[in-house]
Image (cartoon, rainbow, N blue to C red):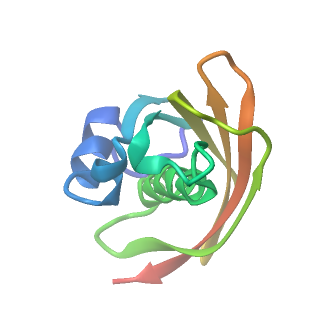
Amino acid sequence: MSIWKISATPAEMNRRSGHSLSTYFGIQFTEVGDNYVKATMPVDERLMQPLGIMHGGASCVFAETVGSTAANFCVDIAHYFCVGLDINTNHLRPVRSGELIATARPYHLGKTTQVWSIEIHDREGKLVSVTRLTLSIQTR
């Protein structure tokens, strides 16, 4: 059974995310299933910290972008919108270059909150970080 309240496609998610922080980070939505979303993000000099590895905040931006975008496709956007309330990210492996893949799945889709799991892997399938994102559902 699909969790989406409105038509969720990678093209529509990319359109909605255009001209925002996700554009600067190069985040692209690539796949939408019945209960998940996938996106990619390149790791390059824009995302590095002085030690030559990706800044941990970049993982948080990636996770929150994917999770909050997905969350907003799970509500009737004529009446509601979702915004981040809490984010917890565990950084498990450093990344120096390449492309990352985030997969977001809901734990909870409630009337006033949503809680999402976002796993970020590298192209070899190694787990880079795990995030739990809680969103508040607001009335327009």
- In screen coordinates, is 27 left or right of 62? left
User: Residue at image x 60%, y 37%?
Assistant: 103
Number of numbered discs overlaid on the protein picture = 0
Can you tell which quarter of the image residue 108 is in? bottom right
Looking at this rendering, what residue extends furthest in the bottom direction? 139
Residue nearer the viewer, 7 or 24: 24
Q: Position of residue 74 (x, y in %)?
A: 48, 55
Q: Is residue 127 left or right of residue 120?
A: right
The front one of 65 and 126 is 126
Q: Is residue 109 visible?
A: no
Q: Which residue appears at 51% of the width and 48% of the height?
A: 48
* Residue 135 visible in image: yes
Q: Residue 114's x, y, as percent?
A: 63, 65
Front position in the image: 128 or 138: 128
How far across and how far down the image is residue 89, in percent?
72, 58
Image quadrant where one finds the C terminus: bottom left
| Residue at 72% in and 44% down | 129
Residue extending furthest toward the top: 124
Give 42 or 31, whichever is nearer the viewer.
42
Q: Residue 71 in the image: x percent, y percent?
A: 50, 58
**Picture quadrant of residue 85:** bottom right
Q: In this rendering, is residue 136 above or below 22?
A: below
Residue 114 lies left or right of residue 62; in this view the side is right
Question: Is residue 7 toward the left or the right of residue 31 in the image?
Answer: left
Quadrant into which the N terminus falls:
top right
Q: Is residue 130 above or below residue 43?
A: below
- At 49% from the left edge and 60% from the top edge, which residue is drawn? 68
Question: In the displayed structure, would residue 20 be above or below residue 7?
Answer: below
